[in-house]
Image (cartoon, rainbow, N blue to C red):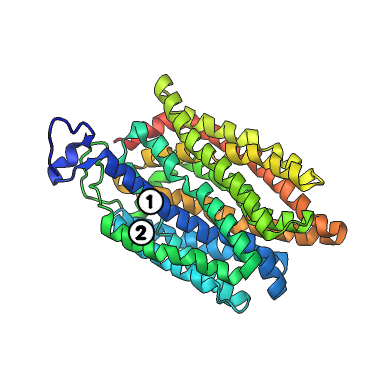
Amino acid sequence: MSIDAKEDRLIRPASEKNGFTVSNNYRFYVLGLLVAVGVCSWVDRNVFSVLLQSIKIEFSFSDTQLGLLGGVAFALFYTTVGLPVAYLADRFNRRNIITIALFMWSLMTTLSGMATGFVSLFLARIGVGVGEAGGAPPSQSLVSDYFPPDKRGYAMGILYLYIPLGFLVGFLIGGWINEFFGWRKAFFVVGIPGVILAVILRLTLREPPRGHAEGAHDSGVTPSLLSTLRYFWSRPAMRHIPLAGTIHGIGAWAMAVWLPSYFIRIHGMGSGEIGTWMALIYGIGGGAGVMYGGYLSDRVVKATGDARWYMWISALAVLISAPFAFLIFLSTTPFPALLSLVIPITVMHMFLGPVTAMIQGLAGLRRRAVAAAFYLFLANLVSMGVGPVVVGMASDYFNPRYGNESLRYALMVIVFVTFLWSSIHFFLAARTLREDLELAKI
């Protein structure tokens, strides 16, 4: 790349000695590419939610079985494979790991449309989980090496746009394709684009040197997985942040999986109609929350010089969203319930950028992918694995007393309690955050 005086957008950190220079335009291209990868993962993961009721009808599954398919089948293997894959990402080429993972989970999503019963669908969902284990941790590590610490909250906020955008695309496309062509076709349509994107990523994404954005020297030595986990567990903030995400995720993931079925079952809406509503609320509201949360936290921390605001903003965002569970699930008509979703969905997405930025900051150069996987392991194993199943089991338990209304009360209680509890751990994480960040630099 040629360099002249006019190229004020060129990033030239200490790692330039390795011959790696990159423009602002390219680093935002990389960020956009990783957002697209994340969208594919979230669509493939969450399209299942809007198809639940159709799958239940075809196979006569119980709510507990649906909870297992929507939670355990994906989460158990996603989280257990995530740590060893992340360890490889801290040692080897992250671009190649993401490429292989993207190809695998997209293929397994397509195969979900060929399921013949519970076992085959369970196995396909396992395949999606195993593939997606190689997506988020290496992506977060790459973003940390492309964007410096003072812009990392905003960059991570942009990266996490894949969650609301994935909801938007998954709910919208899945809902209408299911309504007109059936749930099997929906899996085919959302699975195939990921295979194409895997090729584009492999050909156009450059692997940066570790510590590129900080201009830091990378020793090239990766700590062992066990020593890394011990290091994380010795830092109070690295315990409370994953606990906060885990507890919040139980309610949040239960909502994501069960809300379409809730509105179809309780309020008599069609899959296309509720898919559109969920797409708009999660896509636009969640997207605004993710973007503004990262931007706001970076601005406040820069103005105050106090990194604890990353945690305080996260705690307040989750706390504010908790009471809306009563408005959503006690409403007797669909539209007040849907409107009541807008504020909590927007606000509860605000913590994603700040939390991810802090996890990366607490990790050190050669622990970043494992740090992301450590957080995702604790958060997703419980939230994805337990949330949908607990709601399904509670709904089945309450069914003899409340009949079709049992899902309403199962969701309301679990969402309110988990959101309130989660905010406590974010406040606790703030107590030692500054000290733990300083120790990470040693």
- Whole-percent x and y of residue 101? 39, 63
Q: CA distance from mark 1 to mark 2?
A: 9 Å
Q: Nearer the viewer, residue 282 or 270?
A: 270
- In the rendered view, tell whether residue 132 sits above or below residue 185: above
Mark 2 surroundings: few (<14), some (14-19) or many (≥20) residues within 10 A: many
Identity of the residue drawn at 66% across and 58% down: 272
Q: Nearer the viewer, mark 1 or mark 2?
A: 1
Most distant residue in the right direction: 401
Q: Which residue is mark 2?
A: 98
- For residue 33, side relative to residue 291 (left or right): left
Say which element carries label 1: helix
- In the rendered view, tell whether residue 431 sits above or below residue 55: above
Q: Type of residue at label 2? A: Ile
Q: Which residue is mark 1?
A: 34
Most distant residue in the front direction: 180
- For residue 129, side relative to residue 7 (left or right): right
- Whole-percent x and y of residue 368? 35, 47
Q: Type of residue at label 1? A: Leu
Identity of the residue drawn at 19% across and 42% down: 21
